[in-house]
Image (cartoon, grey):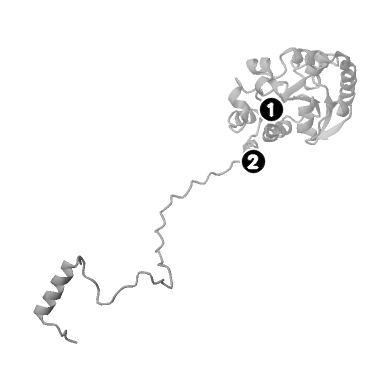
Amino acid sequence: MESQLDWHQAKALLEWQIELGATEATLDVPVNRFELTDKAPVKEPAKAQKQTPALRVEKVDPVAVAELATAGAQDLAGLKQAMAQFEHCQLKRGARQLVFADGNPDAKIMIVGEGPGRDEDLEGRPFVGRAGHLLDRMFAAIGLSRTADDAGGSIYITNVVPWRPPQNRDPSPIEIDMMLPFLRRHIALAKPEIIVAMGNISCQALLGKRGVTKLRGQWATGCGVDVMPMFHPAYLLRNPLAKREAWQDLQAVQKRIR
């Protein structure tokens, strides 16, 4: 539809509106700014930022690693090397050296202690401090020695853990569990007829029980071998009256061997 205004009329109306203060041109249809819309404007979702996938850390089972390491040990030398290469026990980081064993590996009697102390950590052999000297005297009383050449008159000594715990504390249950496969393999390779479990930690590792005061003097079975729980020599140094019970246990070991 053509406009009824000519050019001159349209120009005159525009100039009049400008004189009234109009500054902007408007649409053909007026806009009601107060009218509510039925729907709020939908915002487009922001593009998700590309995230870098987190690195997945595999959890290592130290007991499984220990079992795998011991499976390849065909002799005591191989077992010692496997223990030296085991990196999952924190005790290794604070110890000077590995304390593997001492005595005659062909001995009928295997003594299992708890863990190395300061003297053992320095020398690299188990039971060489004051407690070790008492242990030597105890077994010498029934005719056995760690230096004897014949299997019938010798003893073989090791520990549940081969590295010294800080401040000579007890090994933790986690440390005992991860080193237990090595101890079991040690026993399987040495083939002792009798094991003497010295102290609570040894009883826990071999028998799954603590409380050496109640366990001592009673034969049990651990790792398929007869086990005699006994007071640790360090305990006997602190409690000399307990040497009477220790002597009874030694006589029971002597009788079983004969």
Q: Quadrant of residue 117?
A: top right
Q: Quadrant of residue 114?
A: top right
* Residue 27 sits above or below residue 95 on the image: below
Indicate left or right for 135 with 4 as reference.
Answer: right
Residue 121 visible: yes
Residue depicted at 80% across the width and 21% down the height: 232
Front-lying residue, 66 or 26: 26
Residue depicted at 65% across the width and 24% down the height: 163
> Badge 2 is on which residue?
64
Image quadrant for the N terminus? bottom left
> Badge 1 is on which residue?
161
* Residue 107 sits above or below residue 205 on the image: above
Front-lying residue, 139 or 27: 27
Q: Amino acid at mark 1?
A: Val
Indicate left or right for 227 with 97 as reference.
Answer: right
Front-lying residue, 105 or 182: 182
Image quadrant for the C terminus? top right
Residue projecting furthest to the left:
8
